[in-house]
Amino acid sequence: MRRKRLAVMLVALLLVAALFSTVLTGCGGNSKQASEKKAEPIKIGAVAPVTGPAATYGKSTKQGYEMALEEWNAKGGVLGRKVEMIFEDDKADPTEAANAFSKLINDNHVVAIVGSVTSSCSLAGAPIAQRAGVPMITPTSTNPKVTEQGDYIFRACFIDPFQGTVAAKFVYDNLKARKAGVIYDVGQDYNTGLAEFFKKGFEKLGGQVVAYEGYPDGTTDFNAQLTKILDAKPDVIYCPNYYNDDGLIAKQARSLGFTGPIVGGDGWDSPDLVKIGGDAVNNCYFTNHFSKDDKRPEVQNFVSKYTSKYGEAPDALAALGYDAMNIMLTAIQNAGSTDGAKIKDALKNIDYQGVTGHIKFDANRNPIKSAVILKIENGKQVYVTTINP
């Protein structure tokens, strides 16, 4: 009987030892898995048009993204992990943008998205990010409707009501214009928004919009619209479109005999504007988010590093892309987590000194920041003034 009891005790001890060993092995495995997960890179989605009609915008913005990301990784990454950017080209097409956002979220499992560039594309992607609870910050989409898509949607740029009003004030106060003609692309949310806010701002100041002409997306011959505008004898023409259209509009307006100033928005900020418009865009003005001639140390440091890396000075798209990526990575670091809700809350409380200005978000997740006025002289951008909110 005693031997039987000893045998039973021995079997029980062996079972306990085996179970304990299994638990230890399991714990070690979980610890190893947790360690491996911690070592995995943090995946950030990025969207911009590097092909299509807004390709120069996308190129600059993407380079801004990359430069910010490289600086973070050189310092050890975020939360002790490297950051991996998964990039999608939306070709400045809303359908492509929606597909890009869906792919980044559902296939690549990104924790946040930086992009897109044009307002129409951001409006296509924002609802997808909002439904998925994935924080998104657009560097450059200025249409107010973008952040209205939900509380996970932010932006690094000022919005069209401010930009359109700034342009109206500059045209009325600085250029002393009292009659303005407006020509805009009816197929783009950015263009229609700026046209509307310029008109409201100019008329509120006492100016008169004597012609307000829209054209279909993809138009290359603007003579019909410009003829109507010039028949109304404006002092200035406001062109709140993208550079590829406005370069052609300027040439065609000059060929029809218009010699007054032409004014635009930040969509003019491309080296291709001068390539397309030539001398026709000289002595013209546009509102923008950034000037490489800004003397602030953070701006000049950025300009120096960017020029050294890419062989050209940064434009506003590059600066906004850089700021937007930095803001998102700072928020993740501040959140101490890659959880979407925690990143969103950290973004709401961000206080970031960027190259495009000091950024804190208002209740609608829009930054309150200054705008600059630039003039084109001899094919070069020249800083004119800064307009504060």
Image (spheres, rainbow, N blue to C red):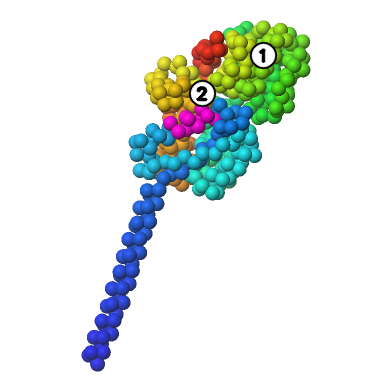
Q: Is residue 238 magenta?
A: no
Quadrant, the N terminus:
bottom left
Which residue lies at the image location 42% right of the left edge and 35% below the top edge? 69
Q: Tell me how far mark 2 sits from mark 1, CA to CA.
A: 24 Å
Judging from the image, what secondary structure is the residue with disc 1 in?
helix
Q: Nearer the viewer, residue 66 or 200?
A: 66
Which residue lies at the image location 54% right of the left edge and 36% below the top edge? 47
Q: Nearer the viewer, residue 24 or 2?
A: 24
Compare marks 2 and 1 and give the one earlier in the sequence.
1
Residue 76 placement: quadrant: top left
Residue 357 appears anywhere in the view: no
Q: Main SS of the magenta segment?
A: helix
How far across and down, in percent of the image, does residue 25 sit? 33, 65
How far across and down, in percent of the image, does residue 60 sit? 51, 27
Residue 337 placement: quadrant: top left
Magenta residues, start to end: 58-67
Picture layout, residue 151 above or below residue 252 = below
Say whether residue 303 is left or right of residue 179. Answer: left
Q: Nearer the viewer, residue 169 or 310?
A: 310
Q: Which residue is mark 1?
A: 251
Label 1: few (<14), some (14–19) or many (≥20) C-alpha neighbours in 10 Å: some
Picture layout, residue 146 above or below residue 265 = below
Label 2: few (<14), some (14–19) or many (≥20) C-alpha neighbours in 10 Å: many
The amino acid beneath tag 2 is Ala
Q: Nearer the viewer, residue 178 or 116?
A: 116
The amino acid beneath tag 1 is Lys
Say whether residue 5 is left or right of residue 353. Answer: left
How far across and down, in percent of the image, does residue 108 sit? 51, 47
Q: Which residue is mark 2?
A: 316
